[in-house]
Amino acid sequence: MNFNPFSLAGKTILVTGASSGIGRTTALACDRMGAAVVASGRDSERLEETFNLLETQPKCQVTADLTHNDDIDKLLSSLPPLDGAVLCAGNSTTLPLQFGTREKFDGMFDINFFAPVELLRLMYKKKVLKKGASVVLIASIGGTHSFMPGNGVYGASKAALNAVMKYAAREYASRKVRVNSICPGMVDTPLIHRGTITEEQLAEDAKRYPLGRYGQPEDIANGAIYLLSDASSWLTGHDLVIDGGFSI
């Protein structure tokens, strides 16, 4: 008897930010679990790389910058009815609050908050999300469970996203649409290797995690699989912390 409550077979899942990092890994994990994946991202070349790795049919790719309303409309018009979505597109920065100008906050909120919230709002309003669908927002422990110097601008955007998740979960429950978030600790993706923090500083920082390492994109993707699957059918409005024990 092949019983697997974590299977995504027969489900159609949208993954944004699928051109790299957590988004790409999540798209590939959904594919391996049997889902038909709609992969979206800003970088068409890297998105094509993700698309070519997907095996489950039908599959679809849509290049879109979700900070632009026209691109959100393009994505929405391309979407089939969805059983789930993982909204991974986002950015990060390390910036002391004294340098956190309105422009810096606006830029971070446009990508990390307004873009996914607008997409979520319209997917629900236009009934792209099927009854019983599951939406996963990628938030962060920064701003919700851990408050480290230099994380204020980034953390505020993710804290706001996490708050909207809870309101959406409450309001969308009338259609049995579940909304949850994942709050990762530091995850080893290209975002953290841009030179803002040295490799030596990263290695030293990783020692502060009780499990002795940063997360890998697979750690977050596996959490998303759980939240998308029928195994979590009685779970909504929850922020799932995956941080190697850092927040304790």
Image (cartoon, rainbow, N blue to C red):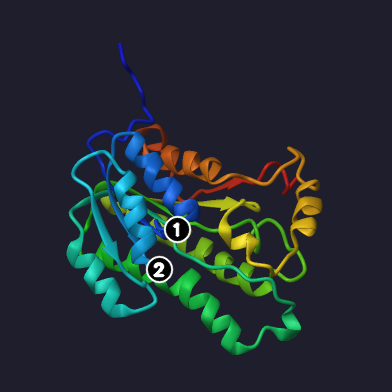
Q: Circle 1 is placed at which residue position?
A: 88
In the rendering, at what x and y percent does residue 145 appear? 68, 56
Q: Residues within 10 Å of mark 1 (few under 14, many from 20)?
A: many
| x, y percent for residue 60 | 23, 53
Q: Quadrant of residue 102?
A: bottom right
Given the image, on which type of amino acid does mark 1 rest?
Cys
Name the residue nearer the viewer: 97 or 161.
97
Which comes sooner in the sequence, label 2 or label 1?
1
Viewed as shown, does residue 240 lie left or right of 155?
left
SS category of the residue bearing label 1 = loop
Q: Secondary structure at mark 2?
A: helix
Picture disc at residue 117: 2
For the point 71% across and 58% down, the residue is 146
| Residue at horizontal 27 percent and vertical 39 percent from the top | 55
How far from the left and from the top, in percent, is residue 109?
Answer: 51, 76
In the rendered structure, the answer to whether residue 228 lies left or right of residue 221 reads left
Q: CA distance from mark 2 to mark 1?
A: 12 Å
Task: Examine the rendered structure and indicate whether residue 18 appears above or below residue 214.
Answer: below
Name, please, the residue furthest toward the top: 1
Q: Residue at x 31, y 79 (%)?
A: 69
User: Relative to 127, is 31 above or below?
Assistant: above
Give the mark count.
Answer: 2
Q: Residues within 10 Å of mark 2 (few under 14, many from 20)?
A: many
Residue 124 point in image, percent of width and height: 27, 61
Quarter location, residue 141: bottom right
Instruction: Give the quarter of the figure containing the N terminus.
Output: top left
Amino acid found under the numbered disc labelled 2: Val
Question: Which disc is residue 77 wearing?
Answer: none
In the picture provided, is 226 more to the left or to the right than 158? left
Tag in front: 2 or 1? 1
Residue drawn at 58 percent across, 44 percent down? 216
